[in-house]
Image: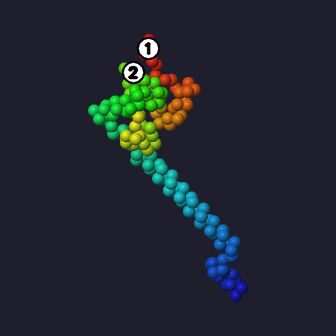
Amino acid sequence: MARRAKETDCKGAALTRLDYEKLRLAAKALAEAKADREWFAKQSARKQSKPKKRSGLRGPQKRRLVIALAEQQGNLCALCEQPFTESHPPTIDHKQPLMHGGTDRIANLQAAHGWCNRRRGAMSIWMFRRMLANGRIEPPPSEES
Ligand SMILES: [Zn+2]
């Protein structure tokens, strides 16, 4: 008789507070682990499926835009603040890099030397300027020689 009573207890009819708390924590840990796994799966799927983002700006539209942006900036590079020249003409730079979710919208565009643009890559403008200031990035060589 006594054994039977114990069995019913084990089947959960009368869980103690402690048992309940243990179960709750275990369920929580399981749910968190599942969420983590899902997040990682989603991230890696996104990395694989997303091709390298490219600017949609092309041809004459792009050329007009470069000229307009450069004029708006007083013919100075938005990154190194040096003037554009024959050998270092303006190119379109994305303030927020495409790689980091930036778009081709005009508010995200500025004119910069191709030289600076390439050296900046997906770096923040702030970081580029800092590296330029401490000599870790060289400004485009001037052609007054
Ligand atoms: Zn520049």
Extreme residue toward the left, this view: 60
Name the residue type under label 2.
Thr
Q: CA distance from mark 1 to mark 2?
A: 10 Å
Residue 118 picture quarter: top left
Q: From where the camera sits, is residue 99 visible?
A: no
Residue 9 picture quarter: bottom right
Q: Quadrant of the N terminus?
A: bottom right
Q: Which mark is residue 85?
A: 2
Name the residue type under label 1.
Glu
Question: Which residue is nearer to you in this view: 57 or 75?
Answer: 75
Q: Quadrant of the C terminus?
A: top left
The residue shown at (62%, 65%) is 26
Q: From where the camera sits, is residue 142 visible?
A: yes
Q: Which mark is residue 104?
A: none
Classify 88 as above or below 31. Answer: above
94 displayed left or right of 36: left
The spot of residue 91 in percent (x, y) is: 38, 30
The spot of residue 22 in percent (x, y) is: 66, 68
Residue topped by disc 1: 144
The residue shown at (57%, 58%) is 33
Q: Is the residue marked by circle 2 packed among few (<14), some (14-19), or many (20+) residues within 10 Å?
A: few
The residue shown at (53%, 58%) is 35
13 displayed left or right of 121: right
What element does badge 1 sit on? loop
The spot of residue 138 in percent (x, y) is: 51, 23
138 displayed left or right of 106: right
The spot of residue 73 in percent (x, y) is: 41, 31
What element does badge 2 sit on? loop
The residue shown at (68%, 84%) is 5
Give the mark nearer the N terminus: 1 vs 2: 2
